[in-house]
């Protein structure tokens, strides 16, 4: 879905080493939950791993049901460029019961608030997947597609009930048997403010505590999310006894030990890109970029808090108006700031690394940074590259068995592939890999070590150059004169803890297919380089088999060693925002494509 990402960047910008095995901490073991997929990325650490379950063969789509009834309108929005710019809840599993979202109402290109969200309980009765009840929440997503892709609406299972997002930064406590509201939990007293948003998936630590992020703005839903600075932003904890603790991100950052760059003031100035009229970048070796008001540090949109075995909570903040000023925040179990690791000045793979220096040359040339540029800088700012955080993303922190933390950040200069950043449990930057965009990595523990699994897209195509949209200076990978860049290709890759590749699997399918109303499938071969992987949270079973969705409309099972075991077509080949998968104790895989839920079985 990189074209949508690239389109949104200008408006956002204007508005706005390695760990070796001998150094690893003692491996931590998360409790097995084979009958339970209660939250985003399966568990509190977001490892997406089931240690006692193996997936069934991908022989049939036993269930195919529509849950997003606004898909046609969403795809027809010109800003969507024919794709589906929506983040979706992972299907939540509790034994034979499954909880999925649905969405209807009226789609509007100017506000998400006219749509309606619902939580639905289904249950297996033999081979039949039967709806039990529907709960209608009053939650709605912030912003519009003019601001960012549609934010995620995401419930959680804990304490024998379902917790569901509500309007005004509230959550509903729902009876799982009949869908009735037990209680609305409001961290803000009795007020329901429509400009205050439950802005993340709900997470649980396995001990009955629920964690989520809230953002309050001053502008109504019909205005841009970025019109004014945020009013406030909080991390909220709700205990099993419904007790509430909330702490503002400003307070957390004031308490935390800052690792790296200091936190900029909300009214300070933050760097944004040079002007297109100044291409090739940087315009001079000592050029300073444009600046914009930073805005207050607040929760990044869609960040599901992760909770370590020792109770430390991890989340991510960003400057409201500036995507290059971000922090991975560690929070003590008593909800005080522990440390905050800046994502600035962590990378050095810009000019002269990702592309050459001093070879701009005009139309048809190789492109690259202007002669004299400093080695390794981000050409857009002439500064050491930071990991950027966009509100289009749903990447959330993943805690590895050694206590270290992985987070997928965005970078444009490496063809919008982003970077997977890796920090120690003390907040020290360890290493990175040059893909991380909108990706919560999976962890596969084996022996006395573990592997990290995530998508690894090498983007290309028209108007997708190395650091700008002008083909005179920034050719894409298909340009014959840019062969040094390597080809456009799309992979799922497994890494060791130091982010060295262990294996990689490439999508080589060329067919765009569509399932017709009668169930037949028609295809056209129009993707000679394969399809992008659109999964943002995969499944890894007890054998290390990886289950992931591709934009070709298929669900893939990839075995250890990068071997294709099986794939099955679902509904439509489509450029789509992100579709997390889950698995139940019988090995049935729950996947999503084009607003449809599929359950894949033997």
Image: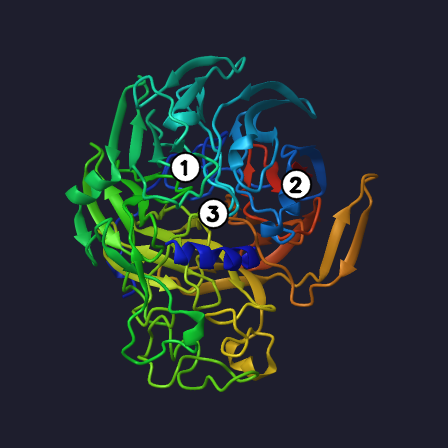
Quadrant where the N terminus sits is bottom right
Which quadrant of the figure has residue 244? top left
Above or below — where is 166 with respect to 308? Answer: above
Which quadrant of the figure has residue 304? top left
Position of 373 compared to 513: left or right? left
Give me the residue at 20% from left, 47% from top: 339
Rate crowding at label 2 as few (under 14), some (14 to 19) or many (20 or more) other CA atoms within 10 Å: some
Mark 3 vs 1: CB contact within 8 A: no
Q: Which residue is mark 2?
A: 73
Above or below — where is 8 with respect to 370? Answer: above
State the SS at label 3.
loop
Position of 380 compared to 176: left or right? left
Estimate the spatial distance between the alpha carbons at disc 1 and disc 2, rounded to whole Å: 24 Å
Q: Which residue is mark 3?
A: 147
Percent x, y of residue 373: 33, 81
Rate crowding at label 3 as few (under 14), some (14 to 19) or many (20 or more) other CA atoms within 10 Å: many
Rate crowding at label 1 as few (under 14), some (14 to 19) or many (20 or more) other CA atoms within 10 Å: many
Percent x, y of residue 143: 47, 40
Q: Which residue is mark 1?
A: 200
């Amino acid at each position: 879905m990189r074209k949508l990402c690239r389109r949104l960047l200008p408006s956002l910008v204007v508005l706005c080493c390695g760990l070796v095995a001998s150094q690893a901490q003692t491996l931590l073991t998360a409790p097995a939950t084979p009958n339970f997929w209660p939250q985003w990325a399966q568990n509190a650490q977001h490892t997406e791993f089931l240690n006692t379950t193996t997936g069934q063969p991908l022989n049939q789509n036993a269930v195919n049901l529509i849950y997003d009834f606004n898909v046609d309108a969403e795809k027809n929005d010109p800003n969507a460029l024919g794709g589906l710019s929506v983040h979706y809840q992972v299907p939540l599993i509790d034994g034979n019961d499954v909880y999925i979202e649905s969405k209807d109402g009226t789609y509007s290109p100017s506000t998400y608030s006219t749509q309606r969200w619902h939580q639905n309980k289904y249950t297996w009765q033999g081979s039949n997947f039967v709806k039990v009840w529907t709960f209608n929440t009053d939650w709605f997503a912030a912003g519009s597609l003019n601001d960012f892709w549609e934010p995620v609406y995401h419930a959680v299972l804990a304490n024998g009930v379902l917790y569901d997002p509500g309007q005004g930064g509230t959550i509903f406590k729902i009876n799982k048997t009949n869908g009735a509201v037990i209680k609305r939990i409001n961290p803000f007293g009795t007020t329901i403010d429509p400009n205050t948003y439950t802005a993340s998936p709900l997470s649980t630590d396995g001990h009955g505590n629920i964690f989520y992020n809230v953002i309050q703005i001053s502008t109504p839903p019909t205005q841009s999310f970025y019109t004014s600075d945020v009013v406030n932003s909080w991390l909220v904890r709700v205990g099993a006894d419904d007790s509430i603790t909330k702490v503002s991100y400003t307070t957390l950052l004031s308490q935390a030990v800052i690792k790296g760059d200091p936190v900029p003031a909300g009214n300070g100035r933050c760097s944004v890109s040079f002007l297109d009229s100044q291409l090739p970048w940087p315009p001079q070796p000592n050029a300073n970029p444009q600046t914009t008001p930073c805005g207050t540090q607040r929760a990044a949109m869609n960040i599901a808090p992760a909770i370590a075995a020792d109770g430390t909570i991890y989340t991510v903040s960003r400057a409201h108006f500036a995507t290059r000023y971000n922090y991975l925040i560690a929070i003590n179990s008593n909800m005080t700031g522990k440390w905050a690791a800046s994502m600035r000045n962590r990378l050095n793979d810009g000019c002269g690394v990702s592309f050459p220096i001093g070879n701009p040359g005009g139309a048809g040339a190789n492109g690259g940074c202007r002669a004299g540029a400093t080695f390794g800088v981000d050409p857009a700012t002439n500064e050491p590259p930071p990991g950027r955080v966009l509100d289009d993303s749903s990447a959330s922190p993943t805690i590895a068995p050694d206590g270290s933390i992985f987070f997928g950040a965005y970078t444009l200069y490496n063809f919008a592939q982003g970077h997977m950043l890796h920090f120690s449990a003390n907040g020290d930057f360890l290493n990175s890999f040059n893909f991380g965009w909108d990706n919560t990595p999976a962890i596969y523990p084996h022996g006395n070590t573990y592997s990290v699994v995530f998508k690894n897209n090498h983007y290309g195509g028209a108007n997708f150059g190395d650091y700008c949209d002008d083909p005179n200076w920034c050719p894409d990978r298909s340009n014959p004169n840019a062969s040094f860049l390597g080809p456009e290709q799309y992979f799922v890759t497994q890494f060791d803890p130091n982010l060295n590749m262990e294996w990689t699997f490439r999508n080589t399918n060329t067919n765009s297919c569509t399932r017709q109303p009668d169930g037949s499938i028609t295809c056209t071969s129009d993707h000679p380089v394969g399809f992008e992987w659109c999964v943002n949270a995969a499944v890894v079973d007890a054998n290390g088999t990886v289950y992931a969705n591709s934009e070709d409309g298929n669900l893939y099972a990839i075995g250890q060693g990068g071997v294709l075991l099986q794939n099955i077509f679902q509904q439509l080949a489509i450029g789509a925002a992100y579709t997390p998968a889950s698995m139940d104790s019988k090995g049935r895989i729950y996947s999503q494509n084009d607003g449809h839920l599929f359950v894949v079985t033997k």
